[in-house]
């Protein structure tokens, strides 16, 4: 059975529609719906467009991916389209955390909505995490000190970009830059952009358009893969102290 056959039937069932009602919704005939679901014929491009518009799911996902394991809540909004957001569970129906390895970060941009890509990732369970869907992302470089190169940020998926909290850290997936870990600031009276800032002030902050953001994951915890030495801990403490003092001094100036 080809994915498109199973997908039409499954998505129709999610809508709780009979073949006849579904056909009416699309201005098709019941026999056409039956022929597609039973594999006696395949929908031409104009009918695929109809399906894509009706379910608000891209054509390539309808054609390539088996959506039978997907529930209606397995889809998320990206722009004006819904894409499949795979959530994996163990035998006890507990959510698992997919680990994005450093070597796979380059492919995450093209595979973040692909169940086959997500399925092949290693998975772990962290029982102390709050409710929600989490993934672990590798950190490269020193832009977010004291988080070290090679550490993993475990973050919770955010369904609504408007829930971003000013000054908190997030994993952000963008169309142009792929995955980045930054502190987000929300410019006043600007509903179209966000300011991404590094905690290491050697790196300049930059503006990104909200429409270019594909996913946002809110920081939950950090897993370090390297031990800190005494000098690093002292340096990190000093840097954090000065950063806190700067915030306090700026607050005094505004008084």
Image: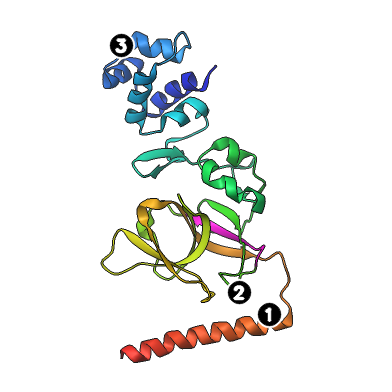
Residue 209 drawn above or below residue 169:
above
| Number of numbered discs visible in the structure rendering | 3
**Disc nearer the start of the sequence (2/3):** 3
Of badges 1 and 3, the one in the foreground is 1
Q: Are marks 2 and 3 in contact (CB under 8 Å)?
A: no
Q: Is residue 42 visible?
A: yes
- Residue 11 highlighted magenta (yes or no): no
How packed mark 1 is, by other alpha carbons closer than 10 Å (few <14, some 14-19, many 20 or more), is few
Residue 252 drawn above or below residue 214:
below
User: How far apart are the alpha carbons under marks 2 and 1?
Assistant: 9 Å
Q: In the rendered image, which residue does mark 2 sit on?
A: 146
Q: In the rendered image, which residue does mark 1 sit on?
A: 232
Q: Is residue 159 left or right of residue 88?
A: left
Q: Secondary structure at mark 3?
A: loop
Q: In the rendered image, which residue does mark 3 sit on?
A: 29
Of badges 2 and 3, the one in the foreground is 2
Residue 108 drawn above or below residue 8:
below
Q: Is residue 129 visible?
A: no
Q: Quadrant of residue 200?
A: bottom right
How packed mark 3 is, by other alpha carbons closer than 10 Å (few <14, some 14-19, many 20 or more), is some
Q: Which residues are magenta?
A: 149-157
């Amino acid at each position: 059975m080809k994915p498109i056959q199973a997908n039409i039937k499954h998505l129709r069932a999610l809508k709780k529609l009979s073949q006849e009602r579904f056909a009416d919704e699309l201005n098709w005939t019941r026999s056409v719906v039956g022929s597609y679901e039973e594999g006696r014929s395949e929908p031409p491009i104009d009918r695929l467009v109809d399906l894509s518009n009706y379910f608000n799911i891209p054509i390539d996902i309808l054609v390539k991916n088996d959506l039978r394991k997907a529930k209606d809540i397995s889809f998320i909004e990206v722009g004006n389209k819904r894409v499949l957001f795979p959530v994996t569970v163990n035998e006890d129906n507990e959510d698992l955390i997919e680990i994005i390895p450093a070597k796979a970060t380059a492919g995450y941009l093209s595979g973040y909505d692909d169940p086959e890509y997500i399925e092949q990732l290693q998975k772990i369970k962290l029982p102390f995490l709050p409710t929600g869907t989490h993934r672990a992302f590798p950190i490269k470089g020193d832009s977010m000190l004291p988080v070290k190169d090679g550490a993993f940020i475990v973050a919770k998926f955010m369904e609504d970009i408007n829930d971003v909290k000013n000054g908190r850290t997030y994993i952000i997936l963008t169309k142009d830059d792929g995955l980045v870990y930054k502190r987000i600031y929300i410019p006043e009276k600007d509903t179209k952009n966000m300011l991404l800032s590094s905690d290491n002030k050697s790196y300049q902050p930059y503006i990104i358009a909200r429409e270019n953001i594909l996913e946002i994951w809110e920081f939950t915890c950090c897993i370090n893969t390297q031990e800190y030495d005494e000098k690093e801990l002292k340096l990190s403490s000093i840097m954090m102290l000065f950063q806190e003092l700067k915030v306090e001094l700026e607050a005094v100036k505004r008084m």
